[in-house]
Structures are given as C-alpha cells and as structure tokens.
Image (tube, helix red, strand yellow):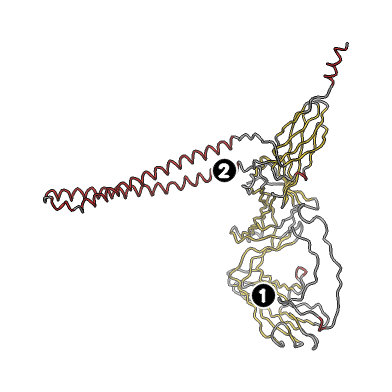
C-alpha cells in the first residue's frame, strides 16, 4: 500500500507556477483637453495554480503609479512594475509596415540609379568639352606653318567641324543632364513621402515598461486582464467652422475635434471618447485671503504707479488650465462625445480630425459699429444656442460669410441656452467717425485740478453700400464709484440700452441705416468734484 501513496500525493499537489508573457494593445481611450485615460484589455489562458501574468509592452513613459488592474476569471495577487531591465520583446512587423519598408527600398534604388544616369550624362558633356579644347590646341600649334595650302585648308575644316560637333555634343548632354536632374525632384518627393509613411507606422519606442500581476486559479481559466492609467502626452482640441447665410439668417456650426498623442506607441482601432473634463487642472475651489482696508491722511496715500493706475489689492487667483459624427452627452458637469467607429492615431505623427456633427440656429444679423476704436462696422450675428450642445472654447474657430472665408480666431465658451454674438468680418462701406466737438477742463495731463470736466463728441455712421443695414452702435460714458464725484451725460438720440451685458457705462443704440444715408449721435458728459480734490482718469 505504501508504494501507492507517493504518486497520489504528487497528483494532488498544486500545478507548477509559471510566468505567462502576454501581448496587450490599447482598446479604449478617453481623451481630455490635456491628457487621457488609456484602457488596455488582455485576454489570457492559464492552467490551475499560481502564475505571473507579465506585460512587457507598455510604453516606457507609462505612469505606472496610476495604473489600475482588474482581473476576470482568477484571483489577483500583488502587482509589480518595472521601467528598467525589462525583458526584450519579439516584435513582428505587420504586412503594412513590411510593404512600406519595401517601397522605401525600391524608391531609394530607383533614385540611386537615376542619379547615376545623370552623372553619366554629365561625364559625356565633360568629354565633349575636352575634345573641343584638344582641337583648339591643335589649331594653335606652331607646326601648322609648315603645311601646304591644301593641307592647311583640310586641317582647318576638320578642326572646325570636329569642334562644332564636340560643342554640340556637350550642349546636348548638358541639356539632357539638366532635364534628368529636374526629373529627380518627383522621385525625391516620393521617397520622402514613403519614409514618412514608415515613420507613421513605426514611431514606437523600443524601450518599454513592464507590469506583472500575480494570479491564482483553481482550474484552467480563460480570463481577461484590464489595465487603465492616465497619461499627459495626449489630448484633443475642439474646432468649429461657422457659416452665416445672410439671405436666410441661418448660422450653421460644423463641429469637429483635433486628436493627437505622443505616447510612443500607435493606437489602432481604439474606442474613442472625448471629454471636456480637465483632471490635470484645478479640481478644488480657490482660497481667498482676508481683506483688510486702511484709511489715512491724503498725504500718506501712495502715488500712482508708472502705468498711471492705482496699485491693486493682491488676491489669490486659481490657475487656468459626409463623415462619421460623434454623439454627445452632458451630465451637468462635463460634455463627452462618443465616436461611433474605431480610430487610429499614430504616436507623434498624426493630428487626426474627427467630426462631431452640425447644429443650426437662427441669427439676428446687423452691422455692429464701435466708433471709439474702429473705423468700419462689422457683420454681427446675435443668436441663442437653443440646442443642447455646449460650444467649447477653442482657438480653431473659422468664420465664413455666405460661403467666403473671413477669418480665424478664438471662440469663447457658449453654454446651451446662452445668448451670444459673433462677428463675420468688416463692412468696408460703412464708415465710422467720432470727433470731440468741445472740451472744457483744467490743466493738461492725467491729474485734473479744476473741479469740472466736460466733453461733447459727435458720432457719425455713413452707409456707402447699396443696401440697407440694421445698425447696432456701441459707445460709453464714464461711471462714478464715489459720492463726491458727480457724472452727468446726455445723448441725442437716447441709447436703447444702458449697461450692456452688465458692463456699467456701456451704451447701445439700435437703428436702421438705409443705403447712402448717415446717422449722427451727439454725446455729452460732465464730471464735477470738490475743489480740494483731484481727478485721476
């Protein structure tokens, strides 16, 4: 009986522990304006027992401290990470990369042969010029004086004919060489494109990081390991093409996004989500310091600084941080866009543009005039974002008026349901002027020692176009924040709105401006203050 015990005990023992090397790839990415959360899914098969599941193909710059691992099908133990002394990987080149490399080799060989042909042609030209030079030297030989007339005539004819033929050969060879040299430009450009294609397919770093997970299985398993981590070297940026049609008053907004990453590995067929969250930015409220104002005698008040402005109280300021279309979701905190199909993004090579769909709004179009700072009016479209989409801030906003590109500039955030006004270029035929009619004041300079300052300006808007325009004109009057400083003003005609957009002293007039006509506004202001005080402007 004792002879049967040992084999039974051996069979009942656990399976031998082994290291299981796995290959992973990025399957899903959530991109933020600055950074991304990357998900890798790794299927695996393991016999019963204790094992180490080893990923040796993570980019070397992977922030391993942020990596989170989940496991289906087995019990997970400890996680080990390493950036140095990672075992080498056996990287098999895919057919696309092999074909791209073969094309580079073919083009390099063709360019080398073409350059050799050009050199051969130039050698022919050199040989022809050498023949001509040799014939010229024969013609100048002193021995020719001993020749008879007939012999000399024959020699001269031979040298002339041969020299002409040699020079013609040299010129023809030079022309062929120059033409062949110009023909190389297309081959050089094709080789450059082929090399870029290879770089786009293989920008991946050879050095890698490693992540190892200890697992225990009671029996053979077919499981799945999921690894997620957050990186900084990726992101996305919204872009908009805004088309205004004057005839219909329709504002069409084509939304898109630029996507880029420099992680050291290519993303292929990843499920992509774009999010407006900024995990790398400010994630908690700012802090303010106590405000302790002081009073003192007039002579103790510090003078104005060099820029002519009173010094500010210091305060803490938080730092700012026919295509497929993505669907958007808004949860009250952020907007996310789920792209409908897998996306490829090469590391360091691509700036992929994705379409996020088109929205439309009805716009109130007018000529907007700000004579205080401008000489012409601008096309302005006022609209309400009555879609459920948030227009995100971006420097990549391109503006089109009736199909014509008028400029690119930044676009501020426009929340869903918010009103906004956008400009679509100059109206050269609407000229603006703002002239001071009379001014009564004390001494010149920034400090006014008189107790009164009065000013009257005449504002004119002239329509030199052949069409009527609704006009929105913006100007301003001074605002007092002290009881002792009294400010009065008059406008003829009176403005339609004061304190426009909540800004004190900003006035707006709205009127019709027929073709060929001029609108005039007279605006007068007066400031008064006690005799023992001075006015700073």
Could you tell whether 8 is left or right of 118 in the image? Answer: right
Residue 167, image x and y in percent? Answer: 28, 50
Residue 201 x, y percent position in the rendering: 60, 41
Residue at 42% over, 49% down: 182
| Residue 239 horizontal/vertical position (percent) | 66, 54
Q: Mark 1 or 2 closer to N-term?
A: 2
Of the two numbered discs 1 and 2 in the rendering, the one whose residue sits closer to the viewer: 2
Which numbered dot is residue 197?
2
Q: Nearer the viewer, residue 524 or 210?
A: 210
Which quadrant does the N terminus fall into?
top right
Q: Position of residue 42 (x, y in %)?
A: 73, 35
In which image quadrant can residue 285 be found? bottom right
**Label number found at residue 372:** 1
Residue in the image at 66% along x and 69% along y: 368
Q: Tell me: residue 233, above or below residue 321.
A: above
161 vs 99, nearest the viewer: 161
Which residue is pictured at 48% across the width and 41% down the height?
Answer: 108
Q: CA distance from mark 1 to mark 2?
A: 54 Å
- Disc 1 residue crowd, few under 14, some 14–19, many 20+, Cα 10 Å: some
Classify mark 2: helix, strand or loop.
helix
What quarter of the picture does the C terminus occupy? bottom right
At label 2, counting other C-alpha atoms closer than 10 Å, the crowd grade (few under 14, some 14-19, many 20 or more) is: some
> Above or below — where is 225 with respect to 464?
above
Query: On residue 55, which mark appears?
Result: none
Instruction: Determine the secondary structure under disc 1.
Output: loop
Residue in front for this viewpoint, 425 or 263 = 263
Q: Is residue 140 left or right of residue 214?
A: left
Q: Residue at x 58, y 43 (%)?
A: 199
- Answer with left or right where residue 43 lies relative to residue 131: right
């Amino acid at each position: 009986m004792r002879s049967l015990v040992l084999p039974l005990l051996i069979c009942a023992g656990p399976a031998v522990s082994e290291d299981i090397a796995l290959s992973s790839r990025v399957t899903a990415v959530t991109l933020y304006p600055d950074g991304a959360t990357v998900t890798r899914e790794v299927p695996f098969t393991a016999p019963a027992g204790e094992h180490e599941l080893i990923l040796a193909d993570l980019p070397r710059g992977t922030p391993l401290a942020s990596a989170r691992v989940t496991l289906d099908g087995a019990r997970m133990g400890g996680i080990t990470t390493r950036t140095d002394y990672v075992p080498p990987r056996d990287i098999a080149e895919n057919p696309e990369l092999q074909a791209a490399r073969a094309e580079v080799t073919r083009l390099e060989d063709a360019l080398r042969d073409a350059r050799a042909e050009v050199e051969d042609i130039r050698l022919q030209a050199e040989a022809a010029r050498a023949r001509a030079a040799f014939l010229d030297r024969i013609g100048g030989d002193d021995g020719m004086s001993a020749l008879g007339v007939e012999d000399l005539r024959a020699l001269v004819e031979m040298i002339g004919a041969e020299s002409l033929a040699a020079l013609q050969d040299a010129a023809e060879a030079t022309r062929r060489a120059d033409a062949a040299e110009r023909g190389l430009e297309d081959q050089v450009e094709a080789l450059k494109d082929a090399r870029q294609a290879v770089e786009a397919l293989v920008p991946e770093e050879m050095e890698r990081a490693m992540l190892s997970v200890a697992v225990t299985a009671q029996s053979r398993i077919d499981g799945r390991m999921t690894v997620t981590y957050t990186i900084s070297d990726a992101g996305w940026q919204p872009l908009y093409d805004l088309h205004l049609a004057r005839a219909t008053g329709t504002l069409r907004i084509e939304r898109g996004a630029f996507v880029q990453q420099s992680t050291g590995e290519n993303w292929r067929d990843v499920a992509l989500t774009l999010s407006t969250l900024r995990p790398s930015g400010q994630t908690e409220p700012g802090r303010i310091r106590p405000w302790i104002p002081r009073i003192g005698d007039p002579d103790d008040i510090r003078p104005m600084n060099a820029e002519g402005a009173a010094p500010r109280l210091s305060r803490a300021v938080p730092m700012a941080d026919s295509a497929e279309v993505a669907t958007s979701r808004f949860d009250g905190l952020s907007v996310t866009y789920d792209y409908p199909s897998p996306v490829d993004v090469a590391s360091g090579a691509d700036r992929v543009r994705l379409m996020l769909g088109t929205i439309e709004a009805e716009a109130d179009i007018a000529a907007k005039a700000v004579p205080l700072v401008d000489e012409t009016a601008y096309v302005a479209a006022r609209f309400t974002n009555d879609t459920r989409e948030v227009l995100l801030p971006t420097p990549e906003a391109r503006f089109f008026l009736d199909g014509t590109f008028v400029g690119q500039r930044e676009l501020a955030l426009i929340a869903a349901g918010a009103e906004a006004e956008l400009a679509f270029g100059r109206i050269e035929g609407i000229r603006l002027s703002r002239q001071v009619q009379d001014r009564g004041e004390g001494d010149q300079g920034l400090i006014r020692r008189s107790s009164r300052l009065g000013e009257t300006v005449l504002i004119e808007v002239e329509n030199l176009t052949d069409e009527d325009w609704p006009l929105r004109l913006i100007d301003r009057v001074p605002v007092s924040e002290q009881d002792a400083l009294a400010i009065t003003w008059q406008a003829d005609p009176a403005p339609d709105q004061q304190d426009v957009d909540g800004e004190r002293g900003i006035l707006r007039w709205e009127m019709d401006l027929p073709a060929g006509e001029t609108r005039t506004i007279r605006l007068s202001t007066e400031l008064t203050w006690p005799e023992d005080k001075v006015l700073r402007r």
